[in-house]
Amino acid sequence: MTTTAQKRAAFRQLHQSGCFVLPNPWDIGSARMLQHLGFKALASTSSGFAWSIGRADNQVACDDVLAHLTALCAATDLPVNADFESGFADDPDGVAANVTRAVATGIAGLSIENATGDKARPLYDDALGVARIQAARAAIDATGEDVLLVARCEGFLWGERDLSKTAARLEAFADAGADCLYAPGVSTEAEITTLVQAVAPKPLNVLTVQPTTMTVANLAALGVRRISVGGALARAAWGGFLTAAREIAEQGTFTALAGAAKGAELNGVFGGSSNVLCRAHGPAAWVSKVAHDKNKQELFFGGAH
């Protein structure tokens, strides 16, 4: 296995020039498949992981996310960027404490959002938002580890589609120590170009979660350094599952299974990988994981927490 230090060095190098795609696995299998397909780095997805354990997005505890990140990092030779939501704390000290714990999982990067989770007050006040990024930066630096910090401005996702405010926040986050900036929901060429220029020379991440005519080459030409897909791959997988399962349940037919992946192909990729968790953490960790997952099979994701 590639060492954690090597993963972190490779991840930082990817941000120095060019443009790369950072796909988002939701479990060990999807992480290993994305590595097999030739991607250079991965990012976790809060929504994809939540759905995989029968929860709704943003209803997963910090301890569960840390265990998930540890498993992902142990399962792949690729660097992993953590979707660390809002840091699982409001105050900067709480963010710092949780970031310190996240670094210990083996991640190469970590993102912090400025979303509160409160619909009445969806974004943190600007001063607090900056203080939270400063705290995350200080926490990473205190570990002595080379973990890349990503700062996210969630305004576009919460209906505040003011590009000048978003640009100003990202600039402030960059000044506070963020290595990479990210504004999910920004999608037009004009918006993207504005933000690329605003945060330069630091890299900008663009999120693509819907079908689009925009290509990797197009985004690279605009100056985008990295592209992620959030929970879109997980939704695509769930879409195939639901199409086939609904056909069986509602019509009693099985035609949708024609699009299923071949077992031989999956076995060929995953052959010899079943003991990854045991090798990384010992047999007890695998037993614990199985018992943990068995208890997480709630039917209605929205009320599972």
Image (spheres, grey):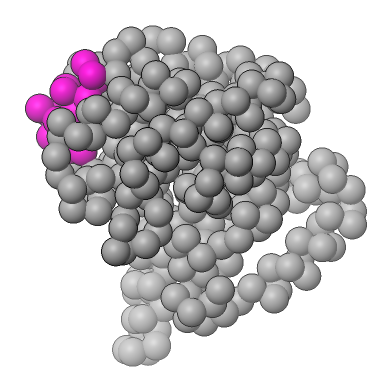
Of 76 and 304, nearer the camera is: 304
Would residue 126 be counted in the magenta stretch?
A: no
Of 201 and 13, nearer the camera is: 201
The extreme front residue here reads 127
Would residue 187 be counted in the magenta stretch?
A: yes
Q: Residue at x 73, y 35 (%)?
A: 104
Would residue 208 be seen by someone viewing this image from the given angle? Answer: yes
x and y percentages locating residue 223 in the rendered image: 25, 16
x and y percentages locating residue 8 in the rendered image: 62, 21
x and y percentages locating residue 36 in the rendered image: 56, 35
Of 100 and 56, nearer the camera is: 100
- For the N terminus, the image quarter is top right
Magenta stretch: dominant secondary structure: helix
Q: Which residue is drawn at 15% across and 31% down?
A: 164
Dividing the picture into quadrants, the one containing residue 202 is: top left
Q: Magenta stretch: give its range.
A: 186-198
Dividing the picture into quadrants, the one containing residue 106 is: top right
- Residue 80 in the figure: left or right of residue 163: right
- Residue 124 in the figure: left or right of residue 62: left
- Residue 78 in the figure: left or right of residue 200: right
Of 193 and 269, nearer the camera is: 193
- For the C terminus, the image quarter is bottom right
